[in-house]
Image (cartoon, grey):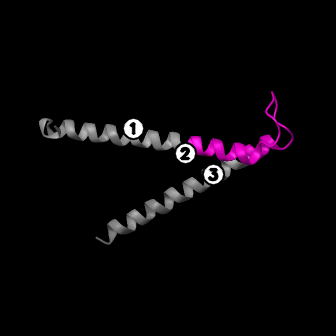
Amino acid sequence: MADQFDEATRKELANFVQAEQAQAHLTAQIHSLTSMCWDKCITSNPSSRFARGEESCLANCVERFLDTSLYMVKQIQEQRDRAQLSR
């Protein structure tokens, strides 16, 4: 079926699929972050307000998760760059 499309259409479809996969990956990461930080920080029964320390715990948890994610992305990008230079 892919043979039915011209080169421009195939590239457009590939870009669309890549963007959708990136969106799905981001959504999965957000879900994971939410679940992990909630389980770690929310120790009381949920109510209209967080218990003492829960809000700051959530903020710190999210910040550490984002810091770690950014670090990992940078490391992967550096590895890709080095691999491309060595070709």
Image quarter (top left, top right, bottom left or bottom right) of the C terminus = bottom left
Crowdedness near tag 1: few (<14), some (14–19) or many (≥20) residues, C-alpha within 10 Å: few
Q: Distance between the residues labelled 2 and 3?
A: 10 Å
Whole-percent x, y for residue 55 in the image: 78, 40
Q: Which mark is residue 20?
A: 1
Residue 8 located left or right of residue 26: left
Type of amino acid at the residue the image marks with label 2: Gln
Judge by depth and name the residue closer to the eye, 78 or 23: 23
**Residue 39 relative to residue 29: left or right:** right
Residue closer to the observer: 25 or 8: 25
Give the numbered dot on residue 34: none
Question: What amino acid type is highlighted by mark number 3?
Answer: Phe
Q: Residue at x 66, y 53 (%)?
A: 64
Q: What stretch is highlighted in magenta?
A: 30-59
The disc at residue 65 is 3
The crowding category of the residue bearing disc 2, from other C-alpha atoms within 10 Å (few below 14, some 14 to 19, many at least 20), is some
Residue 29 shows which numbered tag?
2
Residue at the farthest top position: 48
Residue 37 painted magenta:
yes
Which amino acid lies under the numbered mark 1 shown in the image of this protein?
A: Glu
* Residue extending furthest toward the right: 52
